[in-house]
Structures are given as C-alpha cells and as structure tokens.
Amino acid sequence: MNQTSSIITNNYALKATYYMIGAQVIFALVNFTYDVLTNPWNPMLEGEKLTSSSTVFWQYLIATIFILPLVLKIGLDKLKTRHPMLHEWRALASALGAQVFVFGFASGVPVWQMIGLLLTGPFFVLLGSILFLGERLTLTRIAMSVIAFIGAFLIVGLGTDQFTAASFLPVIAAILWSVTTLISKYLSREESAETLTLYLVLLISINHAIIGTALFILALVLPDGSLPTTLTSGIDFSFPMGAALWWILFLAFLTASSQYLLWSAYKRADAAYLQPFDDLKLPINVLLGWIILSQVPSIGFWPGAALIVGASLYIALIENKKI
C-alpha cells in the first residue's frame, strides 16, 4: 500500500515537473512576443509598434476568453471569500508588474537583462515574508540575498554602454510581482489555490483597463512629451490590426496556455518543489534572444546570473529540508 502510494506521488511530481518546464518554455515565447510587438528596434513586426500598456491590456483580455474553460472547470462557487479587497490589491500589483515589465521591452532593454534581473523576485518575497508575514530572518537568507543582489548589479552593468535607466524596470516588476506573491501566501492560509487562481484570472483584465485609463488621462492632462511614447500615446484601447493582431492573438493564446500548465503543475506538487524549475526561464530566454534577436549577453551577465540562480537554488534546497 505504501509502495503504491509512493509510486502515485512520484508520478504526480513527474507530471508537475513536465508542466512546469512547459510553462517556462511558453514564458520565453511570451517574452519574445513582447519584444516583437513593442521594441522599436525589433524588425520582426513592420510598421508602428504597440504601446506597452495596450499590449498587455489586449493580451490579458483575450487570454481571459481563452481561459474560460479553466474557470468553468474550477467552478464559480470557489469565488467565496472573506478578503475581496486583498484579491483586488493582489490583481492590481500583478497588473502593474506586467505593465512595467513590458515597458522594459518597449524601452529596448535586452531580454537577457530583463530575465536576469527578474530573478531577483524571490529575494524580495523573502524580505516581505520577514517584514509582513512574521517569517524568521536567518543567516542563510541574509547571505543568499546579498549574493543575489551582487549578481543583479553585475547583470545591470553599471558604468557600461549596456546600462540605461530602463535597466531597473525588471527589478521594479520583480518587486510588484513579489507583492502579488506575498498577498497570495497570506490568503493561502485560509483559501484554496482554485480561489486564488479564479480571482486573479477574472480581475487582471479589469485592472489593466484601469491602468490604461489612468495613462490615457495623464496623456491628456500632462504637457506633450511628459510620458514616453512607448508607454502611452493617445487612446490606448484601439484594437491592433494587421500583422500585430496575429501577434496579439498568439500572445494571448500563450498566456492562457501558461496558466493551464501552471495550474496543472501546482495542483500536483508543492510550490517548494516546483520553485527551482522557475529558474529555467533564464537559459531558455537568453538562448531565444541570442539566436533569434541577436541579443548577446554582456560579460557580467554570466557571473551575475550564476550568483542569482545559485543563491536561489541553495535557499530552495535549505527550505525544502525544513518542510
């Protein structure tokens, strides 16, 4: 009986691993598509590029339609909650993170720098968990966080030609997505993964619409040129046409597919087991950007990435032993 139970558990973990790896491959394609749609120096989409805010608005709106079968499978009865405002703040932080992240691509930040710096996210989660969730501050967590941020400074390349102010955008996105994770950790104490998934899926497009409206109002009231054209320019809700339409549909399909895979992975295995596979986004994205977009990483990228990934994996190993 125990042997049968062990086999079933191992099969679930193996399937969860496949789902998680598949999700990381799709995330790499998502990031590649962001670059095509918004980066003014990417030649793969002729004509005028989309603004970053318009891209994520249509991406998540159409993806929500694609993901409706998952919503129905989970069941709307899972929407019962005692914390509706926390779910809204969680969705808003997630939407703001996406807006800032895609704005990085629109600002010409290379994909290797975007993804390398995004990997600092788990360390902001650690800091937030200690400050707001009452988790313990250990010497290991301090040491690994310091090592990771040394790696981040190497990737940013302060003082080199590859550093711009926009290089900090993926770090800001990592902080915002860390807020989403921290609220999720707090809510998970009494709410199911299904409830967390449903609220994020259903609220994310609404929050992108709110952000897009705010940017539109700012574009009207502020002097011309106050906002970067890659962020917003006039009415931001115009439906993309031509080749951009097919890229947006592709992007929305990828987004919906990644949510299916992530939900399937976390349904079969604990987050602590799956977390190290999240670091696979780094080599996959770098290779894709290198081969297709000819974005060659800087010399400082490799030791910086090694420090961040190594620190992340070490913490994951230590935390897993405590579970």
Image (cartoon, rainbow, N blue to C red):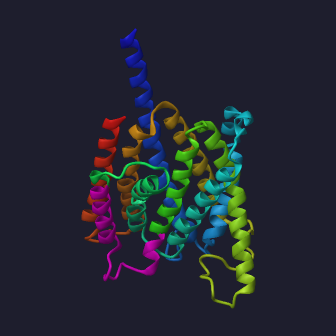
Measured along the vertical axis of the image, is residue 276 above or below residue 268?
below
Closer to us: 101 or 182: 182
Q: Is residue 135 left or right of residue 96?
A: left
Q: Is residue 94 left or right of residue 57?
A: left
Q: Nearer the viewer, residue 101 or 132?
A: 132
Quadrant position of the C terminus in the picture: top left
Image quadrant assignment for residue 303: bottom left
- What secondary structure predominates along the stretch shown in magenta? helix
Left or right of 246? Residue 143 is left
Q: Is residue 129 left or right of residue 72?
A: left
Q: Which residues are magenta?
A: 142-169
Residue positioned 67% across, 68% down in the render:
54
Q: Quadrant of the N terminus?
A: top left
Instruction: Decide whether residue 262 is among the magenta residues.
Output: no
Q: Position of residue 123 (x, y in %)?
A: 39, 57
In the rendered image, the vertical position of residue 47 relative to residue 309, given as above or below? below
Residue 298 seen in the current view: yes
Residue found at the very far top of the displayed protein: 1
User: What residue is shown at x 63% (from left), y 65% (from top)?
Assistant: 55
Question: At which x and y percent is residue 193?
Answer: 58, 38
Find residue 266 and report its horizontal and vertical position in percent: 50, 37
